[in-house]
Amino acid sequence: MSFKEEFVDAVNESLSSRAEELSLRPNVEIWPEDDEDALWVSSHQNRIRTIICDTPEFRDTPFCGAGFH
């Protein structure tokens, strides 16, 4: 038996347990309390890019996405 066949068999054998585990986990990102959208955005943004895009000389560049292109 080749490695590929062994791998596929192992994946197929664990299918039911993976499906069961999937139903136990949330499939969306859940925040523990009601937060403002700004907190979610700030936790997912690139801090270095924010610093660069706050400067006047780079604010209107395509890199920052808010200026004129």
Image: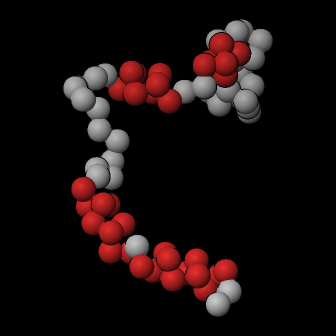
Location of the C terminus by quadrant is top right
Does residue 2 lie above or below 25 as drawn? below
Classify residue 28 as left or right of residue 67: left
- Picture coordinates of residue 46, whole percent (x, y): 60, 25
Residue for point 65% across, 13% down? 51
Q: Quadrant of residue 34?
A: top left
Q: Identify the residue at image location x=26%, y=61%.
A: 23
Foreground of the two, 54 or 29: 29
Task: Decide if residue 13 is on the left or right side of residue 46.
Answer: left
The residue at 71%/21% (across/down) is: 60
Q: How is the image coloured?
A: secondary structure
The x and y percentages for residue 53 are 67, 17
**Residue 56, horizontal then vertical, whole percent:** 71, 9
State how many labels appear: 0
Q: In which quadrant will I find the N terminus?
A: bottom right
Q: Is 45 on the left or on the right of 65, as rendered? A: left
Does residue 53 appear in the picture of this structure?
A: no
Could you tell me which residue is drawn at 36 percent across and 66 percent down? 18
Q: Nearer the viewer, residue 43 or 14?
A: 14
Q: Which of the 4 image quadrants contains residue 35? A: top left
- Seen as rendered, the residue at the extreme front is 1
Q: Position of residue 17 (x, y in %)?
A: 33, 69
Q: Is residue 36 visible?
A: yes
- Position of 37 compared to 47: left or right? left
User: 51 above or below 4?
Assistant: above
Residue pushed farthest top? 56
